[in-house]
């Protein structure tokens, strides 16, 4: 595909409105410089340098949408706590609409704390992660509030994206409401799930990773024929319009039918030599795919742009985004 055409698609992403539904997190990074080994255990001793916070979980696709000039409207749940206030502040600072975020005093804001060592290496290294979360499904009152927000936001949206991190927000009722409102207003419905893909039957676009595709199809995926058969199986069983399987350093595979027709295609990773942190790369892929398809672009071009964007964010620490300027550079300089 002509690189000039890909670059020419980027202005079409501006102003595209995406509703993102799912489990929102606050990602905390505690960075210290490794000075010596502890006498108490075989671990490094870190001298504290800095702490910073990033939107995580379903908030990361929203951040990626905004970075590319789109409009992101978040639907999710935070606790009535300091972490929740901090996450809402981060979302608003990024330009994300938070009117669809419900505060639930009965549960904590999901927080993932990463301990990161800064040493002589070029890039900091994660040593440990501590998750503070509640995996229980949200209560009926919160569920109804989420669906109400969804109903309010969707008439002005171009697409809806579900990001299921399995911490209680993406219930069967919420999934049914997403499909119902997407069909009513004839909007694209996409999903990135870390669990049961069959829960998202009849979504237009389904994104999963290598391991998830193996688990759902019950097959070991190693050759291109394996991935092609898996893509066909997922399209048929889920009655999806398109399936994208991310494969880490091997890039991604895609296949579509109907209005998103695309014969089986494997895209090698755009960047394999400068991979420092893969955190959130899948969020970037589903965000870019959804945004580009919402702009009326074909599936192959959407996947190529998502592939470049993923190659950019793995060069950065933590949940990261790609800007139009960075994408233009990547398209011009990478194969």
Image (spheres, helix red, strand yellow):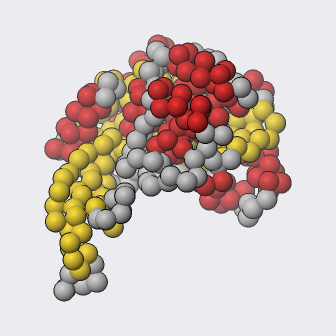
Relative vertical location of residue 244 with respect to residue 241 in this rendering, above or below = below
Q: Quadrant of the C terminus?
A: top right
Q: Quadrant of the N terminus?
A: top right
Q: Position of residue 304 (x, y in %)?
A: 65, 34
Relative vertical location of residue 99 with respect to residue 275 in this rendering, above or below = above
Which residue is at a point 45% across and 55% down the rendered structure image? 276
Q: Quadrant of residue 92?
A: top left
Q: Nearer the viewer, residue 219 or 77?
A: 219
Asked if residue 173 lies left or right of residue 196, the reply is left
Which residue is at a point 26% across and 39% down the rendered structure image? 87
Q: Position of residue 116 (x, y in %)?
A: 29, 61
Asked if residue 104 lies left or right of residue 302, the reply is left
Relative vertical location of residue 219 with respect to residue 277 in this rendering, above or below = below
Q: Position of residue 69 (x, y in %)?
A: 44, 21
Note whether residue 114 is visible: yes
Q: Position of residue 316 (x, y in %)?
A: 40, 47
Which residue is at a point 23% across and 47% down the rendered structure image? 52
Q: Quadrant of residue 114?
A: bottom left
Which residue is at a point 20% across and 39% down the rendered structure image? 86
Numbered marks: total? 0
Note whether residue 144 is visible: no
């Amino acid at each position: 595909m002509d690189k000039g055409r890909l670059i020419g698609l980027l202005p079409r992403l501006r102003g595209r409105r995406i509703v993102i539904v799912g489990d929102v997190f606050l990602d905390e990074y505690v960075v210290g410089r490794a000075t010596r080994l502890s006498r108490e255990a075989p671990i490094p001793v870190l001298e504290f340098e800095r702490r910073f916070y990033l939107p995580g979980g379903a908030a990361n696709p929203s951040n990626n949408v905004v970075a590319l000039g789109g409009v992101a409207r978040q639907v999710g749940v935070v606790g009535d706590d300091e972490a929740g206030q901090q996450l809402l502040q981060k979302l608003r600072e990024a330009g994300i609409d938070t009117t669809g975020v419900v505060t639930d005093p009965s549960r904590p804001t999901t927080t993932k704390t990463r301990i990161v060592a800064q040493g002589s290496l070029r890039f900091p290294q994660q040593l440990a992660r501590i998750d503070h979360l509640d995996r229980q499904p949200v209560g009926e009152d919160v569920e109804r509030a989420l669906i109400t927000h969804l109903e309010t936001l969707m008439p002005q949206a171009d697409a809806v994206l579900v990001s299921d991190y399995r911490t209680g927000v993406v219930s069967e009722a919420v999934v049914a409401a997403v499909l119902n409102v997407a069909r009513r207003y004839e909007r694209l419905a996409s999903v990135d799930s870390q669990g049961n893909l069959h829960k998202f039957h009849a979504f237009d676009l389904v994104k999963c990773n290598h391991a998830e595709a193996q688990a759902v199809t019950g097959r070991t995926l190693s050759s291109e024929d394996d991935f092609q058969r898996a893509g066909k199986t997922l399209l048929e069983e889920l009655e999806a319009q398109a399936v994208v399987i991310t494969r880490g350093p091997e890039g991604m595979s895609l296949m579509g039918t109907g209005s998103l027709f695309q014969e089986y295609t494997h895209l090698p990773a755009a960047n394999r030599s400068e991979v420092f942190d893969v955190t959130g790369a899948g969020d970037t892929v589903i965000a870019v795919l959804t945004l580009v398809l919402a702009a009326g672009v074909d599936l192959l071009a959407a996947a190529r742009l998502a592939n470049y964007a993923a190659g950019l964010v793995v060069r950065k620490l933590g949940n990261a985004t790609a800007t139009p300027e960075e994408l233009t550079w990547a398209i011009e300089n990478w194969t």
